[in-house]
Image (cartoon, rainbow, N blue to C red):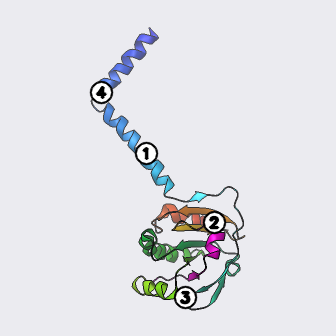
Amino acid sequence: MLKHYKAEVGYSLMKLPHFSAILLATFLLFCFGTANAARLLTLLDERPEAPPFVLKDTKGNAVSLADYRGKVLVINFWATWCPSCRKEMPSLNRGAAWLKKFGVELIAINVGEKPGRVADYLTKEPVDFPILLDLDTDVSTRWDAMRLPITYVVDQEGRIVFRALGSREWDKPELLVPIRSLALP
């Protein structure tokens, strides 16, 4: 009797005109949700200590990771030749402005390019956060930032909490809220 009932229920579901559409929509929603989740931040379970650095900014000032101790810091590694890097730069600027309200700082480290090339790019796409120059790629190598763009989020104690490989829309709440939450008391 139970076997017969299951067979009838299964058959009646398959007869529903929209069952296939619902099944397909559920599958696509699952796939989209999975792809979307990959476009967010990757939480690092181990939270390794951020490799120290001292680099010059575009104005020639020395900037150190230690300068940001006690603050949440977003560090984006990029290059002008990288289309994905250029694509995300405007949203990084908007995200940096929003995060700054909560005491979170953002810097971008240019990987291996001449200062003149970076300056030329910044005249066309100005930003309101510091751009540091890793001329010899030593810092980028120590940070494992050879695939661009890559962004790290460092907590107040100098530990890497999040990583994002590839471009993002950095003004989206689903990216900004977890970063801001690190800065909450």
Q: Which residues are magenta?
A: 126-145
Alpha carbon separation for disc pair 4 and 3: 64 Å
Q: Is residue 78 above or below residue 29?
A: below
Alpha carbon separation for disc pair 1 and 2: 29 Å
Mark 4 lies on a secondary structure that is loop
Q: Is residue 37 above or below residue 173?
A: above
Q: Is residue 129 magenta?
A: yes
Q: Is residue 53 above or below residue 145?
A: below
Q: Pointer 4 and pointer 2: residues touching (CB < 8 Å)?
A: no
Question: At 54% across and 65% down in the image, what residue appears?
Answer: 147
Percent position (x, y) of residue 179? 58, 66
Given this view, does label 4 or label 3 mark the residue nearer the observer? 3
Given this view, does label 1 or label 2 mark the residue nearer the observer? 1
Residue 16, numbered circle: 4
Alpha carbon separation for disc pair 4 and 2: 48 Å
Q: Earlier in the sequence, mark 4 or mark 3?
A: 4
Q: Residues within 10 Å of mark 3 (few under 14, many from 20)?
A: some
Alpha carbon separation for disc pair 3 and 2: 28 Å
- Residue toward you, 48 or 175: 48
Q: Amino acid under label 2? A: Leu
Residue 31, numbered circle: 1
Residue topped by disc 2: 182
Q: Residues within 10 Å of mark 4 (few under 14, many from 20)?
A: few
